[in-house]
Amino acid sequence: MSQDWWRHAVIYQVYVRSFADSDGDGVGDLPGIRSRLAHLRDLGVDAVWITPFYASPMADGGYDVADYRAVDPQFGDLGDVRALVDDAHALGIRVIVDIVPNHSSDRHAWFQEALAGRGRERYVFREGVGDRPPNDWESVFGGPAWTRVADGSWYLHLFAPEQPDLNWELPEVREEFRDVLRFWLDLGVDGFRVDVAHGMVKAPGLPDIGHADQLTLLGTAPLPFFDQDGVHEIHRDWRAVVDSYPGERVLVAEAWTPSAERTALYLRPDEMHQAFNFHYLTAPWDRDALRSVIDSSLAAVAPVGAPTTWVLSNHDVQRHVTRYGGGEKGVRRARAALALMLALPGSVYLYQGEELGLPEVLDLPDEVLQDPMWERSGHTERGRDGCRVPLPWTTAGPSLGFGTGGSWLPQPPEWAKLSVEAQAGDQDSMLSFYRTALRARRENPATGVTVTWVDGPEGVLWFERDGVACALNLSGAVVELPDPGPVLLASSYYGVRDGQVLLPPDTALWWRTAAEAVTSDFA
Ligand code: NOJ
């Protein structure tokens, strides 16, 4: 396996509950993932990131961990993790697991002890102000970030009340997590996606924010509970642990910060290897916005020598086919967005089901919703279940091949046509395009770190890197480009007339420019 593999890897996210179910209980599991590894091999990804499968009461889909060293029986056991890692490695696919250090489950032994009045310093307990919580912080899922316990004191939970925040000022907490990292590294995993990597340290004195609608500040403004400088010491400590193992194991930060520059701090050479590029994910489908976020993303990581990452969807956001307008338009844009993303230098994250062009399920009945956001928001936010509906693998059968029973969220019947089985033999399908596009990237790897913009027709995003050009037509009308010669990849059909390429709207094209690599700056 190659050196610095993570710098230009394509990493596929598996949301374990919704990928494949081996035992018919309607919930995806580890043997299910194992049984579908061939799909990932055929897609051509370098690594898989698996969301939490640890012992959990599932108050937040497993991001509430009751035992960091145990597998939830719903998902399998430690033997299944070993078998999955071995099988994936045999196919040349690395395995990244999730780690959730900001908070544990309220069922974790430590929190149970804390409720009984012992070891409370492992969490963030405070006295309130009269009948009010200790400060004005709001939970990311809505409502106050504090819950009161029987003796009248309050504990902090930036997410659900079932997810009490750990106290990272305490050496015992730090040592425990070092040990958890070693546990999974010993088992053979290739790295960790670090949940809420920007949250573990809070501003001294837990000051009020003084702003009512704090959700609007997430990822856009400085907050006393996110992106505090103190988190970096923890990351440096973790990097030393990970580096003490052979085989280039990696740390990937989930870090929502107000700017690309703040995110780059997580990527200093002795910290994390990568961070999700949420600024890219949230950019609108607009030429100038995309160009600007590409520039700022590349510029921000340049001083720290880290690769940037690109991501369009994950288990927390609306699927991008829907975000980009839905229907045929959304699918067409999603194809072009993939071509753009794979042409950029750096590493790419894919979310399960985007290779099938799955849309967000917007009409899940109220009674099946499980995301804590739904309850916590007083039924005003439907939450994230719409992007977590189990995958369709076959055109028929119970839960469309997801498993032998039902599925924990209902699949739209029309997903039969979007199943892997339906798409695999169709050369125009989204699945075929993903396979083709990933192959084109492997054959023309994005190993450089810069892009050079080319002035083209208005509304066209056009750049070159590593001897490959990529043009994406965001103008809303057909544009003419000088015929570039042999095309390496096209996201949709295009025309050629009188030596000109006719590039339809929302279509991206790659072609080879020159044998030598492009080395000029991105500005
Ligand atoms: C980020 C995870 O991606 C999300 O699903 C979870 O709810 C929060 N962190 C809390 O752990």
Image (cartoon, rainbow, N blue to C red):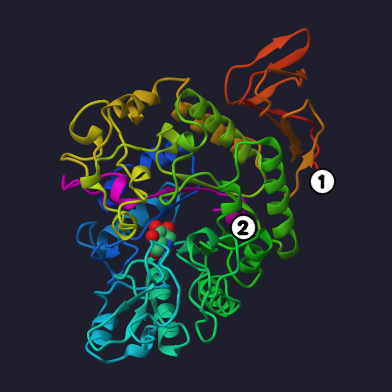
Amino acid type at circle 2 is: Asp
Q: Which residues are magenta?
A: 1-29
Element on which disc 1 rests: loop
Quick one: SS at disc 2? loop
Magenta stretch containing residue 295, yes or no? no
Question: Could you tell whether 361 is left or right of 256 in the image?
Answer: left
The quarter of the picture where residue 227 lies is bottom right
Q: In terms of image quadrants, where is residue 417? A: top left
- From the image, tell me which residue sits under label 1: 519
- Nearer to us of marks 1 and 2 is 1
Q: Is residue 156 above or below residue 316?
A: below
**Residue 137 at what x, y percent from top left?**
45, 73
Question: Which numbered tag is attached to residue 4?
Answer: 2
> Does label 1 point to a residue whose CB lies under 8 Å from ligand 1?
no
Residue at 56%, 49% in the rendered image: 9
Determine the quadrant in which ligand 1 lies. bottom left
Q: Position of residue 354 (x, y in %)?
A: 44, 38
Across and down, in percent, residue 69 comes to 31, 72
Cα separation between marks 1 and 2: 20 Å
The secondary structure that most of the magenta stretch takes on is loop
Cβ–Cβ below 8 Å for labels 1 and 2? no
* Number of numbered discs visible in the structure rendering: 2
Where residue 521 appears, as percent x and y from the top left, is 82, 48
- Looking at the image, the residue that sits furthest to the bottom is 118
Residue in the foreground of this view, choosing between 18 and 159: 159
For the view shown, which residue lies furthest in the front direction? 130
Amino acid type for the residue under numbered disc 1: Thr
